Image: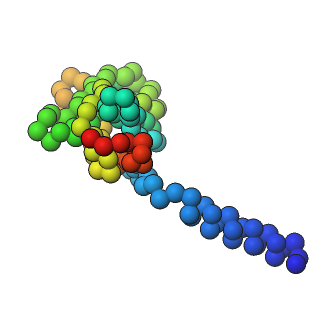
């Protein structure tokens, strides 16, 4: 067998293996909107007390020109409870922004949730942008356990 043919067979085997490695759904597909890009989004799960928290990182296509009120609205898994909100006033020049929610309970394995990042003018509270990132919480059942 020639070297080129061996390489093609090896590449084919690697492709098949890569496709079969995991059936676990991706936590999110990155969204780009209003000059904001979701770089990463995930959940941190505390197995002992069954709490979770959102972990998000965003990148701005252009650094912020001036201070901006960033309001992050995390969907609460309990539909009758208010959303989890974090507000920060970063300085001008910000290019990346990382934020996490407070821990919460009642997260459902395999369910979809959303995080919305809203940029507001600090003085007037005028909305300048809104960036919504859908996400999915998933852990293998043996890790997540039952509720």
The quarter of the image holding the C terminus is top left
- Residue sitting at the far left: 80
The quarter of the image holding the N terminus is bottom right
Say whether residue 145 is left or right of residue 80: right
The quadrant in which residue 50 appears is top left
Residue at the image position 37 percent from the left and 22 percent from the top: 90
Q: Position of residue 110 (x, y in %)?
A: 33, 51
Residue at the image position 88 percent from the left and 76 percent from the top: 2
Q: Is residue 5 above or below residue 37?
A: below
Q: Position of residue 31 (x, y in %)?
A: 39, 50
Say whether residue 107 is left or right of residue 140: left
Can residue 145 be seen here? The reply is yes
Q: Position of residue 44 (x, y in %)?
A: 40, 34
- Residue sitting at the far bottom: 1
Q: Position of residue 73 (x, y in %)?
A: 25, 35
Q: Nearer the viewer, residue 138 or 15?
A: 138
Q: Is residue 30 above or below residue 9?
A: above
Can residue 135 be seen here? The reply is no
Say whether residue 33 is left or right of residue 83: right
Residue at the image position 76 percent from the left and 72 percent from the top: 8
Q: Nearer the viewer, residue 123 or 146?
A: 146
The quadrant in which residue 53 appears is top left
């Amino acid at each position: 067998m020639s070297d080129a043919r061996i390489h093609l067979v090896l590449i084919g085997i690697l492709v098949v293996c890569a496709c079969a490695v995991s059936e676990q759904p991706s936590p999110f597909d990155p969204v780009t909107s209003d000059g904001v890009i979701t770089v990463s989004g995930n959940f941190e799960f505390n197995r002992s007390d069954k709490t979770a928290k959102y972990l998000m990182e965003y990148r701005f296509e252009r650094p912020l020109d001036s201070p901006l009120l960033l309001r992050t609205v995390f969907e609460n898994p309990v539909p009758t409870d208010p959303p989890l909100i974090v507000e920060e006033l970063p300085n001008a020049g910000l290019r990346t922004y990382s934020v996490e929610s407070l821990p919460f309970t009642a997260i459902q394995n395999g369910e979809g949730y959303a995080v919305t990042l809203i940029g507001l003018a600090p003085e007037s509270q005028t909305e300048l942008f809104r960036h919504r990132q859908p996400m999915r919480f998933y852990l293998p059942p043996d890790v997540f356990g039952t509720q």
